[in-house]
């Protein structure tokens, strides 16, 4: 703790120098419509045409500031051009534009829901803004979904402290993870991928549920999670976030950005975290969470002009974890120790051009990325060693067919992975090359009364060849949106998806046991069809904004690999399902602005996930809650000085793996079905001026714990030893304290 605050104050001194050298800050902001939805591609310019730009994928813009009052002009198709008076001291705006048939006015404000389903996107996309992310400690991406009902956070095992996600009732491996629309963090990086993106680096998250765009590949059976990182020309010149908690965790995030000469900007994002204290709250002689140390850095260079944008990025990280048994027991030699080491370097670049041939609707974009990842681990007697080299390239070309009502995107792509992987004496090394191409056609039917299209249909397809399985893959997908009115929207989606399995890395928690791993023959690609419906209604109650959304999804697997932990308590079986395997998911969400600054959100989710096991019986998949609930209450005082956030998650019963053959003395009445439980989190934030925020909060304030988390914890050499059956938190109540600082304003 002392080290963190010493470093923070040192950075404050550095910030004064940086700030003194860069007093002329650019004018930045975001552009939305009346529903608080981000407008991508809106034109923003000074009225005298001295500078012009367009909003990015996060609805943000940046223009050179002025030393005098000026008029900003915002234009977007279907909306009334807006003019905003900007004072010299203003440097960050929220601009809201109205439809052409609405009152012709514009406001500059900051209000509305920070987590909502988009009414403009054809697909069912839910956006989580940076403001929403600040309602929780959000120290990494895995902790960024606490206020969201679409993504569930589950616990991986009792030894590594890793959290996983579930979407549509399916494991996170069936969702495609992207950074700024670039697929990444697959293969051996999968277990810890969500902990490699610090929370302060996030500018926003987009959750696309169900069959999503084919632009980014044939994966994403249950959906896509895309993260937008902060941009150096839009981020603060200096930003510092320091965090500590009662579990012995400390984190420090530092952003350093500089707008260079001309159209070039550079940014450096730094992250350091550690966990030093070792707790054993359930008294099983195993640490509840391992000691951890992570150093993570990202350098970004951007070039922007009206015709072209380009970026270059380098990220490097090292992550260390040590945990396991606290002390040796009498008569049992050695310790069941956990030692997990990960190192990663990733380089990627993007370049886009518009107005090709003098045609504003013709655009081209290129993405190139390469990464190296090494993972070495010791899980008791289990030894894991792996190295992965990956390469990705894609070129996208967009144009219209006749009119702007018909757009076409085509793109060739290439993905290559070289994975050297050993588990104990087994060699699972493999190479996989996937060349492919896609085409996506979009039809929009304008509705001048609404100011937006009332019908949008997106038809996409791609063809890929997978060298690992020597298989040609055809991926068709369809999305459609119909607006009954501006505030009443229906969506339909259907599409096929594939997944290339990485069985050990994706199930690394199984190494936290003494179970033998058995693979049934050659296991091929997983394949599934996803069908989805969404209904969204925005309305007012007593003059206050409200929104309701209903999602219905069905996933049918054509071929699924089942990880069977029921068949034997001392073995795990991997095999292709011979019979039905599916997931049904329903999500109902209600948001309501009760009073100015006071918002509530209620969400209910129902999951029915089943597969046919080797004995021919169709069973519920273990460790998936059938019912989940979420309630959040957020209040911000009118002066924006105090912010209060609280949330309660209710997790329903889960079928647990069959332990009927485990001796009773090892299970200690380990239940067949977990009980329903709740987790209560809360946070209070106090702003001091425009430069400083201090936040304090608590997690699992009601103190619910899974006490018997490890089977045969007192005999780690037993074949029944198992720390992978986690259905609830192991840690009890924790409190945290954090500070955010920026000399140019939070």
Image (cartoon, rainbow, N blue to C red):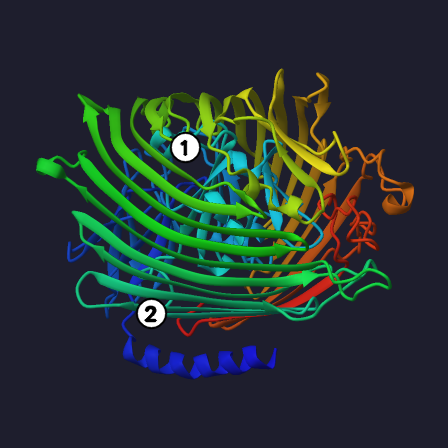
Coordinates of residue 736 in the picture (x, y in percent): 66, 66
Q: Residue furthest front?
A: 425
Above or below for 133 versus 611: below
According to the image, label 1 marks what residue? 121
Residue drawn at (39%, 81%) of the image: 14
Above or below for 396 versus 475: below
- Answer left or right for 96 relative to 129: left
* Residue 693, picture quadrant: bottom right
Instruction: Check the picture and name the quadrant holding the N terminus.
Output: bottom right
According to the image, label 2 marks what residue? 89
Above or below for 216 versus 701: above
Residue drawn at (61%, 40%) of the image: 149
Q: Nearer the viewer, mark 2 or mark 1?
A: 1
Total count of labels: 2
Above or below for 32 versus 532: below
From the viewer's side, name the closer residue of 165 and 718: 718
* Residue 426, picture quadrant: top right
Q: Which mark is residue 451?
A: none
Is residue 542 in view from this perspective?
no
From the viewer's side, name the closer residue of 373 and 273: 373
């Amino acid at each position: 703790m002392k080290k963190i605050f010493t470093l923070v104050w040192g950075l404050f001194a550095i910030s004064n120098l940086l700030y003194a050298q860069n007093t002329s800050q650019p004018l930045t902001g975001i552009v939305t419509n009346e529903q608080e939805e981000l407008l991508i591609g809106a034109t923003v310019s000074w009225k005298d045409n001295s500078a012009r730009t367009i909003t990015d994928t996060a609805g943000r813009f940046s223009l050179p500031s002025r030393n005098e009052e000026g008029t900003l002009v915002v234009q977007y198709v279907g909306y009334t051009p807006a003019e905003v008076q900007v004072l010299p001291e203003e440097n960050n705006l929220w601009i809201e534009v109205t439809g052409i048939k609405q009152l012709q006015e514009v406001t500059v404000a900051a209000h509305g829901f920070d987590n909502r389903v988009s009414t403009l996107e054809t697909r069912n996309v839910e956006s989580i803004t940076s403001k929403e992310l600040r309602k929780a400690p959000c120290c990494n991406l895995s902790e960024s979904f606490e206020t969201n009902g679409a993504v569930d956070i589950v616990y991986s095992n009792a030894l590594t402290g890793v959290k996983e996600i579930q979407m549509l009732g399916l494991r996170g491996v069936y969702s495609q993870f992207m950074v700024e629309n670039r697929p990444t963090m697959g293969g051996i990086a999968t277990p810890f991928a969500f902990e490699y993106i610090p929370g302060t680096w996030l500018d926003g998250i987009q959750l696309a549920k169900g069959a999503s765009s084919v632009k980014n590949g044939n994966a994403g059976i249950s959906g896509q999670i895309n993260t937008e990182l902060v941009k150096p020309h839009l981020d603060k010149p200096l930003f510092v976030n320091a965090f500590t908690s009662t579990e012995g965790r400390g984190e420090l995030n530092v952003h350093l950005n500089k707008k260079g000469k001309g159209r070039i900007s550079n940014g450096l994002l730094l992250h350091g975290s550690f966990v030093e204290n070792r707790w054993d709250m359930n008294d099983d002689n195993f640490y509840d969470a391992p000691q951890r140390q992570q150093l993570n850095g990202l350098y970004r260079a951007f070039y922007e002009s009206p015709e072209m944008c380009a970026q270059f990025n380098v990220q490097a990280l090292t992550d260390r974890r040590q945990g396991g048994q606290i002390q040796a027991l009498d008569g049992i030699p050695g310790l069941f120790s956990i030692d997990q080491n990960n190192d990663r370097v990733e380089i990627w670049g993007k370049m886009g051009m518009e107005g090709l041939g003098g045609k504003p609707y013709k655009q081209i974009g290129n993405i190139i990325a390469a990464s190296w990842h090494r993972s070495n681990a010791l899980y008791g007697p289990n030894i894991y060693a792996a190295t992965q080299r990956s390469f990705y390239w894609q070129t996208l070309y967009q144009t219209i067919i006749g009119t702007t009502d018909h757009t076409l995107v085509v793109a060739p792509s290439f993905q290559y992975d070289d994975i050297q992987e050993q588990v104990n004496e087994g060699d699972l090394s493999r190479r996989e090359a996937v060349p492919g191409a896609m085409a996506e056609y979009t039809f929009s039917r304008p509705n001048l009364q609404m100011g937006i299209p009332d019908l949008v249909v997106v038809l996409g397809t791609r063809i890929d060849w997978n060298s690992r399985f020597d298989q040609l893959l055809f991926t068709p997908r369809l999305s459609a949106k119909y607006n009954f009115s501006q505030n009443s929207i229906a969506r339909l989606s259907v599409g096929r998806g594939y997944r290339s399995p990485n069985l050990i890395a994706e199930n690394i928690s199984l190494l936290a046991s003494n179970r033998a791993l058995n693979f049934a023959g050659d296991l091929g690609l997983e394949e599934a069809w996803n069908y989805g419906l969404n209904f969204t209604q925005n309305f007012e109650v007593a003059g206050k904004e409200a929104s309701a959304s209903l999602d219905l999804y069905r996933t049918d697997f054509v071929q699924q690999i089942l990880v069977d932990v029921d068949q034997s308590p001392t073995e795990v079986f991997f095999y292709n399902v011979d019979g039905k395997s599916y997931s049904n998911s329903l999500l109902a969400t209600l948001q309501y602005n009760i009073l100015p600054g006071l918002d509530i959100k209620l969400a209910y989710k129902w999951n029915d996930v089943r597969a046919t096991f080797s004995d021919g019986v169709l069973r519920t998949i273990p460790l998936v809650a059938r019912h989940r609930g979420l309630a959040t209450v957020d209040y911000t005082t009118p002066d924006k000085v105090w912010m209060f956030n609280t949330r309660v998650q209710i997790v329903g019963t889960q079928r647990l793996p069959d332990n009927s053959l485990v001796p009773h003395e090892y299970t200690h009445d380990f239940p067949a079905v977990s009980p329903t439980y709740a987790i209560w989190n809360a946070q209070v934030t106090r702003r001091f001026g425009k430069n400083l925020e201090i936040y304090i909060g608590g997690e699992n304030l009601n103190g619910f714990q899974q006490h018997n988390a490890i089977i045969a914890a007192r005999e780690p050499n037993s074949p029944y030893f198992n720390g992978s059956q986690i259905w609830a938190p192991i840690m009890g109540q924790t409190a945290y304290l954090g500070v955010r600082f920026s000399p140019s304003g939070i």
